[in-house]
Image: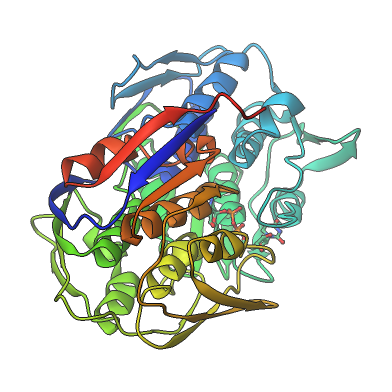
Amino acid sequence: MDSLKIIGGQPLSGEIPISGAKNSALKLMAACLLTAEPVTLTNMPNLADTRFLSQLLQTLGVEVYWPKGDSECRLNAENLTSTIAPYEQVRKMRASFNVLGPMLARYGHATVSLPGGCAIGARPVDLHLQAFEAMGADLLVEQGYVKAAAIHGLKGAQIVFPFVSVGATEHAMLAATLAKGETVLENAAREPEIADLADCLISMGAKIEGAGSSTITIQGVDELHGTHHKVMSDRIEAGTYAMAVAAAGGHVTLTNAPVGALSAINHALRNAGVKVEADKDAGTIEIETTGQPLTAVNVDTAPHPGFPTDLQAQFMALMSVARGTSIIRENIFENRFMHAPELSRLGANIAVRGSEAIVTGVEKLKGAPVMATDLRASVSLVIAGLAAQGETTVSRIYHLDRGFERLEEKLSAVGANIRRTRDEDEG
Ligand code: UD1
């Protein structure tokens, strides 16, 4: 297993290019199952998760042309050989579950393993299943699999989500594109990735209005066609690098950045005393520290346009070196503070009480060996390591490789002392 070795204390300066958004790419890839024509995605991030979904799609019979390292991926689902997504593949990455809706909508049946829990919480898929049932699907959950059938096709439905779910909104939207009649999704998630998915589906011939707002209306069509679509840039990656610069100090321009999607993050950073200059037309965000200590800021995670849960761990790392006490509330997932004890190993002062972490800033963190527990938690340890004095080793970074493209290369290019090593002693 690989580790990252970081010698902290180097200010960062230069440019960091932001990659395509993992969370968008995964749903866009699933969309290829809705059509017999090729779907070409550009600005594709080369990540363990996107490569992994590409393998699952190939298992289903999708032809995938995506040379290693290439940012363009061509998917052709003309001849599916199976509509069964096996446990061995779905359990490794939850977003694989999103192949269910498109296959059900196009073929009238699909069998997909339940994804199971994950490190950050139970993460059920009940809202996804309720949406398909409302669209007339018969569902049977047996031996860990969801067997879904809609022999005469899915029907449009009025679906009111009891709470906001990104995955359920996207999944229902995917399926509704080929349902008969109108589907209205109420209390829909408003994450920018949902608008990106809708834009792609519209370019395939889908009729969708309101994506990005809490009411999405979809008029089903008989079939969809192929398309070329550019994956939006990754707002979580951009926010992560912004926080890395804020923690380590320096002056960095993020390029190819999804400027409009970062308001809550830019707001929190400015409150902490970081200079943030966003240029929407140029797609750049300049991050600059002032040399003064950061100010403690409270944040509450919330569905978009609130502060994203996927940046909570990174912000906690930043607040570990701010002056004063900040309260960080996690409102989306029940078990998302596993990075707190690891940050404490670097000298952070964090007390966790239920869904609240109370972070009292310290003057300096000190390098130590730490262990990654999930994707965003692992990058929070990298941020802390960049700010800390001395050497930090982050082990189990396969979590990090799931969602950050060429992380050590991008950080080294702006002056960070970070390198990948292979652990001999971990099983
Ligand atoms: C997506 C993102 C993830 C992000 C999350 C919240 C992808 C691949 N992942 O995950 O990075 O952290 O949005 O912004 O896009 N829930 C249920 N029943 C359901 C569905 C969800 O109870 O059927 C709960 C979840 O356990 C969680 C909350 O609803 O507590 C929000 O989850 P959701 O928005 O669905 O997150 P994901 O789509 O899984």
Q: Please tell me in which quarter of the rendered image ligand 1 is found.
A: bottom right
Residue for point 83% across, 41% down: 138
Which x, y percent locates residue 1?
55, 27
60 horizontally vs 170: left or right: right
Viewport quadrant of the C terminus: top right
Q: Is residue 206 visible?
A: no
358 horizontally vs 15: left or right: right
Which x, y percent locates residue 3?
47, 35
> Which image quadrant is residue 342 in?
bottom right
Q: Is residue 270 above or below residue 236?
A: below
> Which image quadrant is residue 110 in?
top right
Residue for point 42% across, 39% down: 4
Residue for point 18% across, 58% down: 11
The colour scheme used to paint the residues is: rainbow
Q: Is residue 322 above or below residue 127?
A: below
Residue for point 50% across, 40% down: 221
351 horizontally vs 417: left or right: right
